[in-house]
Structure formats: structure tokens, C-alpha cells
Image (cartoon, rainbow, N blue to C red):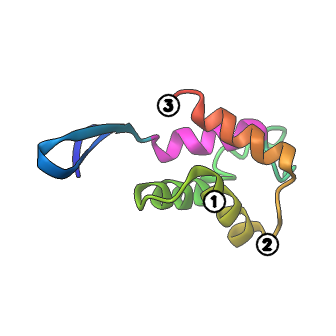
Amino acid sequence: MILLASNIVVTSLSKGNYVKKKQHSQSFISLCLYQIDPMSTCCKENECFDEYDRVARGIKKALEDGYTLRDTVISQFSIWFNAKLSQDKLEKIIQRISISS
């Protein structure tokens, strides 16, 4: 794996073929979660900009390790909030993070 820029990763495949994958920064993922506030923590109202930083760090790490966005989001919210996201909130998160991929 070769890091070309802060958000582009090149993964080598067999016989010299390469595929580029866009990787989001932890701060971008955290911002998406802050804007959605899926756990209704009132982070926007209280200006707690770092409310979802730990979740975002876990999501970024899992994505770098090759896990799917859906599985990663479900897992990280279970770990950090001991809660299951509603399907609606899960879809909003996935859409927001994926929209700029």
C-alpha cells in the first residue's frame, strides 16, 4: 500500500496493477458524525465539536484495515455507545461519509 496524498491510497494487485481508493481523514468522518449527531448527544447545540472523534478514529482505522463502511459504523457505535443505530441513522451516516468518495 502506498500513500499518494492525505486521502488517496494505492493498493498493489497482482502483476503490477494498482487500484486507487479514497481514504477520508478522521476529522472529516468526525465532522460528518457531528453534523448528523446520530446518538442525539446535543453536540451541535453545546458546540462539542470533538464529540465523535473517538468513533471517527475507530472508523478510519477499520476502513484502513479493509472492513466495510457499514460494518465499521455498526461496530464502532456498539463499542463506544453500547447502542445499536437505527437503520435510518445508519444510512444517513453511510451516505454522508460516502458522498465524497
Name the quadrant containing residue 25.
top left
Residue picked out by circle 2: 82
Query: Can residue 1 be seen by looking at this rendering?
Result: yes
Comparing labels 2 and 3, the label whose residue is closer to the camera: 3
Task: Specify the amino acid type for callout 2.
Answer: Asn
Q: Callout 3: 10 Å neighbours few (<14), some, many (20+)?
A: few
Mark 1, other Cα within 10 Å: few <14 / some 14–19 / many ≥20: few
Q: Is residue 35 magenta?
A: yes
Left or right of 50? Residue 2 is: left
Residue 35 horizontal side relative to residue 12, left or right: right
Disc ID at residue 71: 1
Q: Position of residue 27 (x, y in %)?
A: 52, 42
Q: Position of residue 36 (x, y in %)?
A: 77, 38
What are the residue bounds of the magenta stretch? 24-36
Residue drawn at x 41%, y 56% is: 64
Tag on residue 101?
3
Q: Earlier in the sequence, mark 2 or mark 3?
A: 2
